[in-house]
């Protein structure tokens, strides 16, 4: 996640939005977290609008993606009701509209300067080159790994639309972890190797790449018996 005090938000953006590990919306006026939305449908609509924030989405498109759990008598009306609730909630955070209506549907307001965790994460991961000094690569990878605070919008798990988004960023995260651990191992920073291994195993305890680096870290730090338990 991108961490910032509400009072510091305007230095970088009008709005900061986190989707890794769950929804957080931050402005100068305060913060709204996913639990406060009190509706999985609201949170799914917001996540979809954010992930497609450079275009509008119609009520029909949103209903076909989100309202899949049962038959709805008026699916378009249901989506519009939840959009109304989302817009009312966002009014508490900003004088400017976060979600606007266009002739083609609903979208995140393009006039707002928005900083999003998954975009920052992708930008950092994409900035790494093999020509960089090891220490520079380590700094960037540490920042990227720190932002990934759990899978992208976990409440969307199981929905067809969510699979490709979640897989994309999780694979990117595993690659970043692998690169970081390789570099930390290379410079023999065993403490950092152990610290990042312990952090990443909490996010994906069954991933073989992460398990491998945890075993390496434990061995490097003398915890041989503990390392054997993960083999």
Image (cartoon, rainbow, N blue to C red):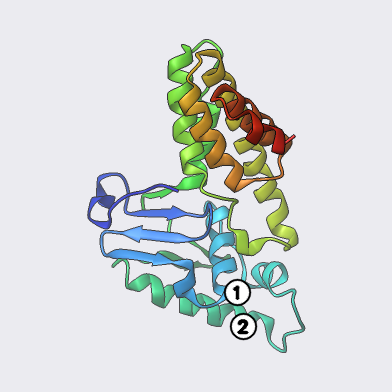
- For this orientation, the residue located farthest to the left is 7
Which is nearer the eye, 224 or 87? Answer: 224
Question: Where's residue 202, x and y in %?
Answer: 58, 47
Q: Residues within 10 Å of mark 1 (few under 14, many from 20)?
A: some
* Residue at the spot 64% in from the left edge and 43% down from the top edge: 170
State the residue position of label 1: 41
Instruction: Find numbered disc 1 in the image and state the secondary structure of the residue it sits on.
Output: helix
Question: Where's residue 38, x and y in %?
Answer: 51, 78
Instruction: Find numbered disc 2 in the image and state the secondary structure of the residue it sits on.
Output: helix
Mark 2 and mark 1 residues within 8 Å of each other at the beta carbon: yes
Q: Is residue 192 above or below residue 58?
A: above
- For this orientation, the residue located farthest to the front is 225
Residue 78 tag number: 2
Q: Is residue 191 left or right of residue 174?
A: left
Question: Where's residue 103, x and y in %?
Answer: 54, 67
Q: Is residue 81 above or below residue 11?
A: below
Q: What's the distance in space between the residues labelled 2 and 1, CA to CA?
A: 9 Å
Question: Where's residue 113, x and y in %?
Answer: 36, 50
Residue 119 visible to the viewer: yes
Q: Is residue 86 above or below residue 143?
A: below
Which is nearer the eye, 231 or 206? Answer: 231
Q: Is residue 113 above or below residue 89?
A: above
Q: Is residue 73 left or right of residue 47?
A: right
* Residue at the spot 54% in from the left edge and 82% down from the top edge: 81
Locate the C terminus and report the quarter of the image it occupies: top right
- For this orientation, the residue located farthest to the bottom is 73
């Amino acid at each position: 996640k991108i961490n910032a005090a509400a009072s510091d938000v305007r230095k970088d953006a009008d709005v900061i939005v986190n989707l890794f590990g769950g929804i957080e919306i931050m402005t100068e006026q305060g913060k709204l977290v996913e639990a406060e939305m009190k509706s999985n449908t609201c949170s799914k609509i917001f996540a979809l609008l954010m992930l497609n924030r450079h275009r509008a989405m119609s009520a029909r498109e949103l209903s076909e993606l989100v309202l899949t759990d049962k038959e709805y008598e008026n699916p378009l009306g249901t989506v519009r009701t939840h959009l109304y609730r989302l817009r009312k909630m966002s009014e508490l955070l900003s004088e400017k509209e976060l979600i606007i209506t266009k002739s083609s549907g609903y979208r995140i307001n393009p006039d707002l300067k928005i900083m999003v965790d998954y975009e920052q994460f992708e930008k950092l991961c994409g900035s790494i080159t093999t020509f960089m000094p090891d220490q520079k690569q380590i700094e960037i990878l540490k920042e990227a790994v720190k932002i990934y605070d759990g899978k992208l919008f976990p409440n969307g798990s199981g929905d067809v639309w969510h699979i490709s988004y979640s897989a994309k960023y999780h694979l990117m995260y595993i690659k970043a972890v692998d690169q970081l651990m390789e570099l930390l191992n290379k410079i023999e920073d065993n403490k950092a190797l152990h610290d990042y291994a312990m952090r990443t195993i909490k996010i994906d305890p069954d991933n073989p790449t992460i398990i491998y680096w945890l075993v390496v870290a434990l061995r490097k730090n003398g915890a041989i018996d503990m390392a054997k338990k993960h083999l």
